[in-house]
Amino acid sequence: MVGVVRIAVVLTVLAAACHGAPPGLGDPEPRADGAIAADAGPGDDGAVRDGMPGTDPDAGPGADAGPDRDAGPDRDAGIDAGIDPPLDAPPPPQTDDLVTTGLCVDNACTAIQPGAIAFEPRWHLWSDGATKRRWIKLPAGAVIDTANMDYWQFPVGTKLWKEFTRNGTRVETRYLVRTGPRPGDWLFMGYEWNAAQSHAVARPNGKQNVNGTPHDIPSQTTCLGCHANNTTPVLGFGAFQLDYRASAGFLDLDGAIAAGWLSQPPPGAASPHLPLPGNATDQAALGYCHANCGHCHNSDSQLTNRPMLRIEGANVDTMARTRLYQSTVNVVARTSPFDGASILAKPGDPDDSVMIKRTTTTDVPRRMPALGIETVDPAGQAILRAWIAALP
Ligand code: HEC
Ligand code: HEC
């Protein structure tokens, strides 16, 4: 189905998403350039998967939205829809089968390629109970630019994968690769595992309820809703998420330093290099919010920065100076009252706190996190409630 994904078009979408709310998050206006249709849904993002315009049999309504879907800053990137490359040009990357991305030794992924290194973030993103495995592969000899410890910049050619297993069945493997030097030069793809577990193929438009489970594969456009709100799209492989002793076989911050992967290693001889303030309850809340909310709620986000729920290094010497504390504790919500509550985190009273109301409401369009879940995270609720209950 998707023979070739036109990188230039993906770039246009990423650039567009960086300049405003991603689809489905309060930006119902179709973009003038048609690069992103107003909302995710089957066929909505034909714009990012290509073929000749209008000739793709899989393209649903909206695939050709807009007068010039290739308009945008990257239209001159060389690879463009409908233009045949010169005969001697290198072929565009094949991304229709997972095995072509370099993660697995075979279609069934019975083993991982040497060079793809497993890692495990310290705090978990709740994904409706799915279990996940992750890997990263850097080009030989390349280093990650860690001058900004909060937002690492990855070398061209960096690849990352995340595999989802639901009810004991592999359902999806996600792939992220840096394709060029510009900030938006990243390609996103979800691969669907077949029922026989023998093969995974690209699903650029996403897919609902894979393999008889409730798991949904996000469309490429939906990936951006979480991955394009920072100066780096890599969300789990970062300083705070790796600053702990990972289990054997998983790369952590000490391992990345020892491997020479970081241009500027953080201070200190061993983890914690970037110690968190507060007690265990505070730290659990910082971690839960960083992992589950920080990809949208951060100081870099054009989408929404308040409350600011990502751990950002300069502000972590005392709990009261963290962005989490300063932007929630005794702070009146912008959308207020919400289900009768007005304060984001009201000390001693989780039930009257907007943070709890917004993460448990049955009003799904207003429930947080705004993407990626169908069920409320029980462990996350326990962490958030304990933190608010203990606030003086
Ligand atoms: C609901 C928000 C959300 C959506 C939608 C989403 N991701 Fe992610 N993704 C995250 C977060 C947060 C992490 C880091 C935590 C983790 O790995 O569990 C992550 C991690 C990853 C990783 C591991 C590398 C990293 O950034 O740490 C890959 C690869 C990835 N995502 C690819 C994709 C692709 C491809 C899509 C679309 C098909 C997608 N993601 C959609 C939030 C999301
Ligand atoms: C995919 C992006 C995304 C994620 C992830 C996300 N949010 Fe939000 N959040 C938004 C957007 C967009 C708004 C503004 C629109 C609205 O109020 O619904 C918002 C608004 C809010 C508000 C209302 C703020 C106010 O002042 O009224 C709260 C509280 C909130 N989010 C908490 C959270 C929490 C807690 C998490 C993690 C468990 C989270 N959000 C994860 C996108 C996100």
Image (cartoon, rainbow, N blue to C red):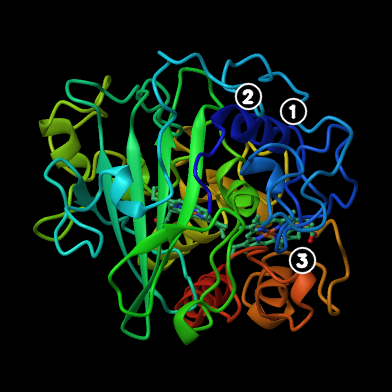
What's the mark number on residue 343? Answer: 3
Mark 1 crowd level (few <14, some 14–19, many ≥20, 10 Å Cα): many
| Pointer 3 or 2: first along the chain | 2
Between circles 3 and 1, the one closer to the viewer is 1
One can see residue 275 in this view: no
The residue that label 2 is drawn on is 80
Between circles 3 and 2, the one closer to the viewer is 2
Note whether ligand 2 is within 8 Å of mark 3: no
Are the residues tagged 2 and 1 within 8 Å (C-beta)?
Answer: yes
Q: Residue at x 54, y 43 (%)?
A: 321
In front of the other: 48 or 296: 48
Q: Residue 293, image x and y in percent?
A: 57, 57
In front of the other: 288 or 81: 81
Query: Three-letter amino acid code at disc 2?
Result: Asp
Is 54 on the left or on the right of 255, as rendered? right
Query: Three-letter amino acid code at disc 3?
Result: Ile
Are the residues tagged 3 and 1 within 8 Å (C-beta)?
Answer: no
Could you tell me which secondary element the residue under label 2 belongs to?
Answer: loop
Q: Residue at x 26, y 22 (%)?
A: 143
In front of the other: 14 or 354: 14
Query: Three-letter amino acid code at disc 1?
Result: Asp
Identify the image quadrant of residue 261.
Answer: top left
The residue that label 1 is drawn on is 70
In this rendering, the answer to whether 110 lies above or below 306 is below
In front of the other: 290 or 126: 126
